[in-house]
Image: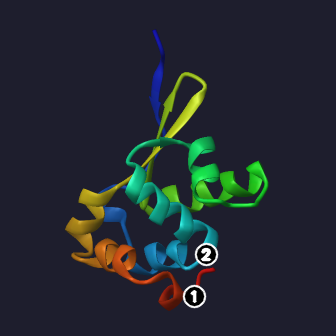
Amino acid sequence: MSTQIETPHPTSDELRLATVLAALADPARLSAVRTLATMGESPCTQLQQAAGLAISRSTFSHHQRVLREAGVLKVRVDGARRMLSLRRDELESCFPGLLNAVLATAPERLGTP
């Protein structure tokens, strides 16, 4: 039997557009979000590999924290694994169309590699 722990996330009322946009402005974080959008919930190690991020594990952890604190990601601890998912419903409720617009934009228009 695995133990599931919820990590703290901002409530929908605490989400701020400037904070969400700042979190999405980093190419590594944006790549992780775009990859996670296609994967659904994913263990963090698999997401880092799937996104092709050639960064250290600690740097990726930092990016996860920024995205979680901005309200973009939900992190659920399941035993020894950290499961990541997008907070689509909350983001759509607060900022209609934002996440879909970011995900639908061609990578070259986003300024990412």
In this picture, is 5 found above or below 19?
above
Identify the residue at the far right of this view. Answer: 56
Q: Nearer the viewer, residue 59 or 16?
A: 59
Q: Give the quarter of the figure containing the C terminus.
A: bottom right
Q: Residues within 10 Å of mark 1 (few under 14, many from 20)?
A: few
At which x and y percent is residue 99? Answer: 33, 72
Q: Residues within 10 Å of mark 2 (few under 14, many from 20)?
A: some
Q: Circle 2 is placed at which residue position? A: 27
Q: Nearer the viewer, residue 16 or 43?
A: 43
At which x and y percent is residue 108? Answer: 53, 88
Identify the residue at the far bottom of this view. Answer: 109
Residue visible at 58% across and 55% down? 64
Q: Circle 1 is placed at which residue position? A: 111
Q: Secondary structure at mark 2?
A: helix
- Tell whether 27 sits left or right of 18: right
Residue visible at 63% across and 60% down? 63
The amino acid beneath tag 2 is Pro
Q: Give the quarter of the figure containing the N terminus.
A: top left
At which x and y percent is residue 38? Answer: 39, 56
The amino acid beneath tag 1 is Gly
Pointer 2 and pointer 1: residues touching (CB < 8 Å)?
A: yes
Residue visible at 42% across and 60% down? 71
Identify the residue at the far top of this view. Answer: 1
Q: Secondary structure at mark 1?
A: loop
Q: Which callout, 2 or 1, points at the residue further toward the start of the chain? A: 2
Q: Nearer the viewer, residue 77 or 49?
A: 49
Residue visible at 41% across and 50% down? 39
In this picture, is 45 found above or below 36?
above
At which x and y percent is residue 96? Answer: 21, 75
Gap between marks 2 and 1 measured at Cα: 7 Å
